[in-house]
Image (spheres, rainbow, N blue to C red):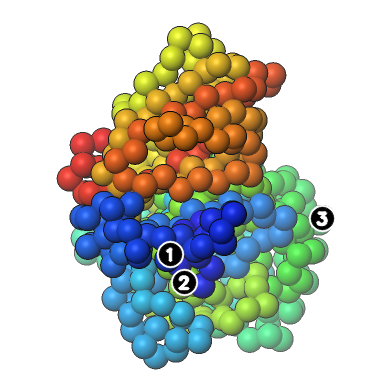
Amino acid sequence: MGTHPSLPSKELETQRTLHDLVQENQALLSPAIAERYGNKLPFLFKVLSIGKALSIQAHPNKKLAEQLHAKDPKNYPDDNHKPEMTIAVTPFDGLCGFRPLAEITHFLQNIPSLRKLVGEEEAKKFEDAVKGQETSDKDADVEANKKALQVAFTKVMNTDKETLASATEELINAAKSEGESFAGEGGPSNGGKELADLVIRLNEQFPGDIGLFVQFFLNYVKLEVGEAMFLKADDIHAYLSGDIIECMASSDNVVRAGFTPKFKDVSTLTTMLTYSYAPISEQKMEPVDYPYTTLNAAAYSSNSSNTLYNPPIPEFAVVRTALNRTGAKSTFDPIDGPSIILCTKGKGTISVGPKKETIEEGYVFFVGATAEVVIESETDGQDGEGLVTFKAFCEIEDEKEKL
């Protein structure tokens, strides 16, 4: 949902694209946003229903995106960066960012097939390089750690097919036979049985893929409903299962290297990554109450909520609204920027001025700048929540910073 030229949203009745609409009427975006982002919506809003692992990938920063687009426009179709935010609609799991170094060392020492891919010499170099400074915040130590991580990871990513096939067979046999003792009983973040089951599941989806080994370098993360994480440009990740809301800068740039039949660019991926390493807790977001809305009495008495997910970039933020009783109402103050509102559960109405429309699961509305929006539920929350909507928006930077 957005104005990206590859697939701009269309108005249901007229089939007019949202791209054309905002190009012709800049006031819908606000003058400041129209000027800053070239008369286009600065974000893309998505719903992903992940039944099979999505590719191991990263999104280039702005400078690299421009370079890749100029060199290879077929595989890198635009020149924008793509930081993104993920909010769980159902329980979700995925791989996100490099694990703490002590965990990677643990896996190198307890998964023989992984150590073979890194190589005994390189594995020893990695262990020696990071030993005693895994959590050091000294610049020199951090840079040395990142360099060691890049060398080991790049070695794995460039494994030849014959070596990978042999190591995969060994890994799968271990996962099936060792159970809870697999991978040295797992690690601080994940148990052995959990990781063994993950190996088996991913191999069924992508047999013999290098991603089976990449997962031991990356955090394995689970999000419950309403939890979220933010991915900066150049952060490696792979979404594995679940339904999610995604919001991202308006871009279609993806550098892939595993779990995919699409174009892979291993050399670009291994050189572009930041190689930052941290527990997944550092990438999970801490949402807060959204202050620029008013709930009526029915909403207050039913514990309805407006929850803000506000990443550290200017292009977008998202508000999740849950109205848990028939008649519960949320009135959103006007903002100096555009919004897209998506309903994922329940039924109700949405109003802008005198215009009122039905809103229910799967309905999407575009709201122009400076409009007050009222959402009202016609659904009781049988299982806790009635009407659920997500509102992606952008406003001028100095206004967003006040949030």
Pointers 1 and 3 in contact (C-beta within 8 Å)? no
User: How many angstroms separate mark 1 from mark 3 (CA)?
Assistant: 55 Å
Q: Residue at x 69, y 19 (%)?
A: 382
If the image is split into quadrants, where does the C terminus sit? top left
Tag 1: amino acid? His
Q: Label 2's element? A: loop
Q: Which residue is mark 1?
A: 19
Q: Label 3's element? A: helix
Left or right of residue 388: residue 144 = left
Whether residue 302 is visible to the viewer of this picture, yes or no, is: yes
Tag 3: amino acid? Ser
Residue furthest to the bottom: 71
- Ranked by sequence position, the earlier of labels 1 and 3 is 1
What label does residue 5 carry, if any? 2
User: How many angstroms separate mark 2 from mark 1 (CA)?
Assistant: 8 Å
Pointers 2 and 1 in contact (C-beta within 8 Å)? yes
Q: Residue at x 82, y 55 (%)?
A: 177
Percent x, y of residue 334: 30, 35
- Ranked by sequence position, the earlier of labels 2 and 1 is 2
Percent x, y of residue 97: 46, 57
